[in-house]
Image: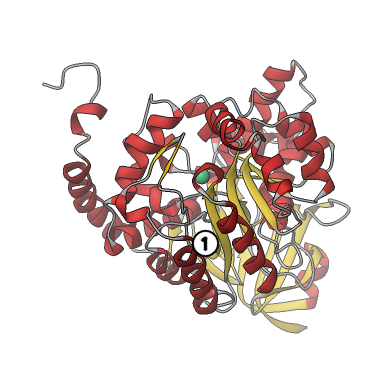
Amino acid sequence: MEKTDLLLKNIDWLITMNGDRQIIKDGALAIRGDRILDIGKSSILSQNYSAGVELDCRDKVVVPGLIDAHVHSAFQMSRGLADEVGDQAFLFERMYPYEGCLDDEDTYWSATLCGLELLKHGVTCFIDPGNYEIEQTARAVEKAGMRCVLSKSSLDIAKSAYGSLPAKFIETTDQCLERSEDLIKRWHGKADGRMRVFLSFRGLNNSTDALITGMKQLADKYRTGVQSHCAFAQKTRDASIAKYGLGEVERLQKLGVLGSNMVLAHLGWLNPKELLLLKEYEVKGVACPSSSLHNGYGNLKMNTIPLLLEMGVPIGLGSDHASSGIIDITLEMLLVATTLKEIRLDPKIMSPETVLEMATVNGAQCALWEDEIGSLEIGKKADVTIFDTLRPEWQPLYANPLVNLVYSATGSSVDTVIVDGKILLEKGQALTIDEEEVYAKVKAISGKILKKTNLAEKIRPLWPIV
Ligand SMILES: [Zn+2]
């Protein structure tokens, strides 16, 4: 018998997401160090390996660690601050004033709270579009033991047709580029390889051509990615056409920056030519269903996501921010599947298989990390999410765990999470984050934020509080 570190055995359903998309019934997974050593039938692996830690996964569904391909960890403290407002007021009257008042300590605890919610819902890796205290985000993620793509947020046009930025955000183009490059030097490949750094211009309408091209050049120089929000609202599209005479993706093409290391979130308000450009230049995209549904952006209504998927453009899934409520990729799978079926009047348009690909293998492509994560295969990183099916919403489970996962389950049925071969969540309890400490800090910080942003009157219920 060969010795190994961790053996998951008697797995009821092991969904590998490998090239053939094999689902192993009564499966097992052997892990050595941070990588998958072997995968197959439990009857065989149990005979071949003895492990320091063995997990009996009877009544469990095991999937590759879920990937949230777009979530602002600095917005985790904004839940309840920006409901029932349009896209422009959402950003410029609620979210930017909120973010503008965060100090380094607030950002650290916001990221820790975000990490806690992601972990408890089975997310092992996330892509963060960035903030202005990103060092604190890096610290929080490193301590939590998660995998992450970080960015320093950058915008170099303080006032656009779309709105004006708070003082804290205002930087010159050179400052944006220098500070982003500095973050790459300090954090890219750090935390035992769990951290990567992308470039991030946060929105096209507040970014000069020089910033966008400079970021793409840095991404190419360091062989990493560049991300942005793109075409998320009718107004961002209209502002782009008013100023540049081009849609947002058309402008990126004119600047010569479209490429396979570019990741664009939302991708709702696009014209047909822009869809073809995304395919031609092998750009990656991220759908953010709860964000669009909560704020009425119309990204799903525009029907671009199924079209891009049908064209073979890799589209990941993102929860975007806690200000839209949900930080749960399992719920995002339900939302993207069902909303698009309704819009297209087609029950087959978004299958459970397609949406699980979005949350795993496609997310890995968005992180430019598909060689190591996104599927459970020998030699890949041991990032694993285990769902407990002994819960009412998982019962009965006949012959297809994918339908129970997508249409019935939520992230709350996640039992165990493993990143880099280390157990970070066990029986639903986080091992690397002190939950009680987090809730105490959040309470103190949220009181401070409410005073600083002066939003108390705007966010109270319509009904009297007595
Ligand atoms: Zn976003």
- Mark yes or no: residue 429 visible: yes
Colouring style: secondary structure
Examine the image and state in which quarter residue 437 appears.
bottom left
| Residue 259, percent from left and from top | 75, 55
Q: Quadrant of the C terminus?
A: top left
| Residue 457, percent from left and from top | 19, 28
The residue at 79%/34% (across/down) is 273
- Left or right: 93, with 232 as reference point: left
The residue at 38%/30% (across/down) is 89
- Left or right: 27, with 448 as reference point: right
Q: For mark 1, does the 10 Å Cα neighbourhood hold few (<14), some (14 to 19), or many (20 or more) residues?
A: many
Residue 385 lies, with reference to residue 89, above or below; the image says below
Q: Quadrant of the N terminus?
A: bottom right
Q: Given the image, on which type of amino acid does mark 1 rest?
A: Ser
Residue at the far left in the pictured view: 466
From the image, tell me which residue sits under label 1.
151
The residue at 82%/44% (across/down) is 279
Front-most of residues 305 and 243? 243
Residue at the far right in the pictured view: 20
- Left or right: 206, with 69 as reference point: left
Mark 1 CB in 8 Å range of ligand 1? no
Q: Mark 1 falls on what kind of element? A: strand
The residue at 74%/69% (across/down) is 380
- Mark yes or no: residue 59 visible: no
| Residue 17, percent from left and from top | 78, 53
| Residue 73, percent from left and from top | 44, 53
